[in-house]
Amino acid sequence: MAYIIENAQLLKDGVSSLSSLMIDKDKILFVSDGFKMYKHMRMDASGFIMTPPHVLLDASVPVDKPFQVRKSYYLNEFILKGCTAFLTYVALTHENQLPMRIKQMRAELVDCPVDYIIGVKIRAPLLTQAFLRKCKKEKVPAVFVEISDLDELRKIPWGWLREAMFPYNSPLVPMFLWTKNNKEKRQAAGFWKGIMKAEKIPSIFDEIRQNEPLKKSVLMKTGIFPRKSHLHNGGEISYNFYLKSNETVKANEKELFFGHQASLAVTVHKGNVVRAGGQVFYRPGTGENVQIRTPAFFVAN
């Protein structure tokens, strides 16, 4: 049965607006400033700040540990933080491992209660046309590239790789192994960005930090947006409710995540309440492997 969430202070990309959402089952039918002519059942959200759920990068999920260890991790690192989807990756030493390792990761995450997106990690010298074609075939939405030094980047035939990536164009994500401080990281990121822009390679321009909300640009380039972390017409009904206070009404999504977790009151995942106050409804196996049809569909590199 359809219903309306009204008077929601909807926070998206740091911008707040008073909105109402018409919901049917696990989908958002419409987002509007009001539905005065409709007689649907209504839920007043005026006491909350409503945000899309957070999406994190996490490559440390203890998939090989006992169930209770995995459950504790999923609860503390995802659900209690308002995260209903995460990006992870499988590490490869050879391109032929790709299909097997992705299949293995899916099996290891079979009891995961939140959704997940699987990328791959490989060393820069192994970045070849053949490998990127395999990534394209498997629809891998992000390729994490371990870089030992800048010379590795100078040796790569970027033009050929660009052709191999087309038309799926999963972005390359740098991982600088040698940088020891912020200055070195900025220099490495600047060098990487220069090559990526000059060669027109789909890419993320800097390292992605683990266990913090992915930036909007990363969500868009990987194709996670608008599938996840976005409240829009026709989208899934997944959201967080933070209690309103003098502090939370001034915060953006990242500030809410890091500084106001105690104010997180409700988390809904695909129409199901997974957290209400101090009560958590743990549903193992309800997480799904999110398949990305087209990375960067809504953004130019």
Image (cartoon, rainbow, N blue to C red):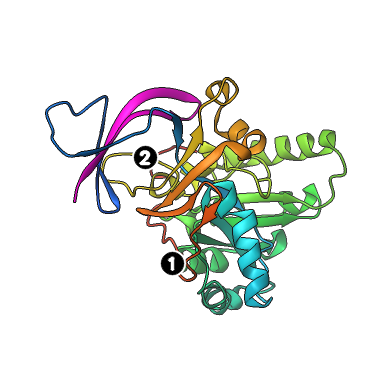
Q: Residue 140, percent across and down?
A: 50, 62
Q: In terms of depth relative to the viewer, which is nearer, 145 or 115?
A: 115
Circle 1 SS class = loop
Q: Is any part of residue 91 visible from this angle? A: no
**What is the three-letter code of the residue carrying label 1?**
Thr
Which residue is label 1 attached to?
Answer: 286
Label 1: few (<14), some or many (≥20) within 10 Å? some
Residue at the spot x=45%, y=49% of the render?
224
Which residue is label 2 attached to?
Answer: 231
Circle 2 SS class = loop
In the displayed structure, would residue 252 be above or below residue 144?
above
Q: In terms of depth relative to the viewer, which is nearer, 205 or 199?
A: 205
Q: Which residues are magenta?
A: 1-21
Residue at the spot x=17%, y=39% of the render?
40
Q: Residue 2, percent across and down?
A: 20, 47
**What is the three-letter code of the residue carrying label 2?**
Leu
**Quick one: which residue is furthest to the front in this view?**
278
Q: In terms of depth relative to the viewer, which is nearer, 264 or 286?
A: 264
